[in-house]
Amino acid sequence: MTAAVEHTEEHRGAFSSRKVFILAAIGSAVGLGNIWRFPYVAYENGGGAFMIPYLVALLTAGLPFLLLDYGLGHRYRGSAPLAFRRAAPASEGLGWWQVGICFVIAVYYAAVIAWAARYAFFSLDKAWGDDPEAFLFGSYLQAGDPGIGLDFVSGVTVPLVLVWVAVLAIMALGVQKGIGASSVVFIPVLFVAFIALVGVSLTLDGAAVGLDALFTPDWGALTETSVWIAAFGQIFFSLSVGFGIMITYASYVGRRSDMTGSGLVVGFANSGFELLAGIGVFAALGFMATAAGTGVDEVATDGLGLAFIAFPAIINEAPFGALIGVLFFGSLVIAGVTSLVSVIEVVISAVRDKFEMTRVGASMAVGIPAAVISITLLGTTTGVFVLDIVDHFINRFGILVVAVASMLAMSWVFKKTGLLREHLNRDGSIHLGRWWQWLVGIVAPAALTFILVNEFIDNIREPYEDYPTWMLNTLGWGLAVAVLVLGFVAARLPWRDNTFLGDPEIKSRQDERSN
Ligand code: PHE
């Protein structure tokens, strides 16, 4: 059986050092969420005062849960399904559930990157004209009424194909040469480009007005539940925990590594980037409000509206508009690609572990269908609606649910957190006490459950946006349930006979002793 372990360890791939792992993990964490989600969430939920619930969420739930993911991946040395399987056979389905969610996210996340790439070029000659909103939905996306339309929009399909080609090339190159090497290049470039963007934004007229709007604390917000919900929600999404990503990446790190210290570096780098994004985005929004003679509240938004409507308007007016455009959309593309790579790796790694496929084989077996679905669904006139609905539901009723389930399962059903704590402490520079188990077993799942119940009630009371019910029932609820069911079905497929399904750590200790 020794051969089987060594076989997988060698062939699965590995990061060449802890530094590369940290960069790849930062690449995953720093995504569109940091740039277009955090600034508005902070602004809406107490401004400067939001920092308090945000830090509480980071320290009591985000980082502890990140370390649980690291512990699982690092100790059990497998993709999400294999790591769960090795921890406790009955939990394998959790891993496949995450695999399903990641596949879905990859399909639509790629489209946003494609739009951003196209918009980087549009900013050179402000191709969106005077009315960026009409341009986005009209000339660019050619979105009609929500429903099924299968007319391809070449402005989307062409960059989308290019995004997939680039990403599949990275995936096929493997853990170190693909994911690791691209992170080593992209992450520093991203930080430099973004700092330059913030620098330019701060020189704009009205930047201070924007920063005031963002940072002026509304202490009253601290008594509102919705503010705390927003803080925990932002932290979980932003750290990429619960996707299976961190389990997968941690499985590629050398056996004797400081995982707790790494977690702290990743967590703080990610939050630092969010803060930076807040400054850059609100400085620009302050400029826009000042130029239009309105308040910042009139112009502040998030998501697609911020990136593809507000920023084009800012670029139209600002000195160095084209430069701002290239830096902003370029940052979105890089931040997006390194996150996209991480979600697809969850799927590829799982397929490889279970079916013993080669790197290139699995990359194509996963990537080509994902690309085809992505291009057919999102390259068409319906794309933007599909994206909006799937994103809304899978983030809540996919990721958050699997996150709670995995914390409770590991803490209370299979009782693995004690062992994982010991494991993380062995080489960790930050000592985890029993308090860590309480955070992962009680505080974090309680916070998440609370968020989920709230979200569930909201979504039942008031169906999301004005979409037709059948669309919400299929692409929203239906898809969220389907990945769960498919996940537990996939877990019933047999592993190869030579796949080692025990605890690799115990095995390696026995091997050392017998040598
Ligand atoms: N942390 C990522 C972000 O902020 C979350 C994410 C990871 C989303 C991977 C999609 C894919 O965008």
Image (cartoon, rainbow, N blue to C red):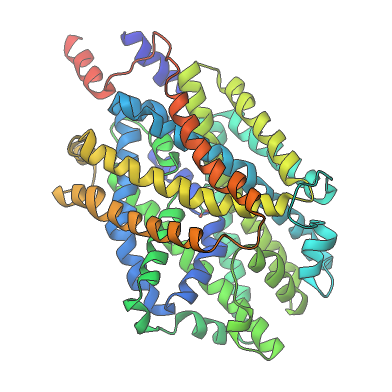
Q: How many marks?
A: 0
**271 lies above or below 265:** below
Looking at the picture, tell me which residue is in the foreground, 274 or 326.
274
Residue depicted at x 56% and y 66%: 195
Q: Residue furthest left?
A: 434
Looking at the picture, tell me which residue is in the foreground, 312 or 279.
312
Say which quadrant the N terminus sits in. top left
Q: Quadrant of residue 504?
A: top left
On the image, the x and y values in percent for residue 312 come to 73, 70
The reply, left or right, for residue 131 in relation to residue 229 is right
Say which quadrant the C terminus sits in. top left
Residue 431 visible, this orientation = no
On the image, the x and y values in percent for residue 256 come to 28, 32
Residue depicted at x 70% and y 54%: 384
**18 lies above or below 439:** above
On the image, the x and y values in percent for residue 403 come to 37, 45
The reply, left or right, for residue 221 in relation to residue 27 is left
**130 lies above or below 257:** below
On the image, the x and y values in percent for residue 235 come to 40, 58
Residue 85 visible, this orientation = yes
Residue depicted at x 77% and y 63%: 136
Residue depicted at x 35% and y 55%: 448
Looking at the picture, tell me which residue is in the foreground, 185 or 411.
411
Q: Residue furthest bottom?
A: 293
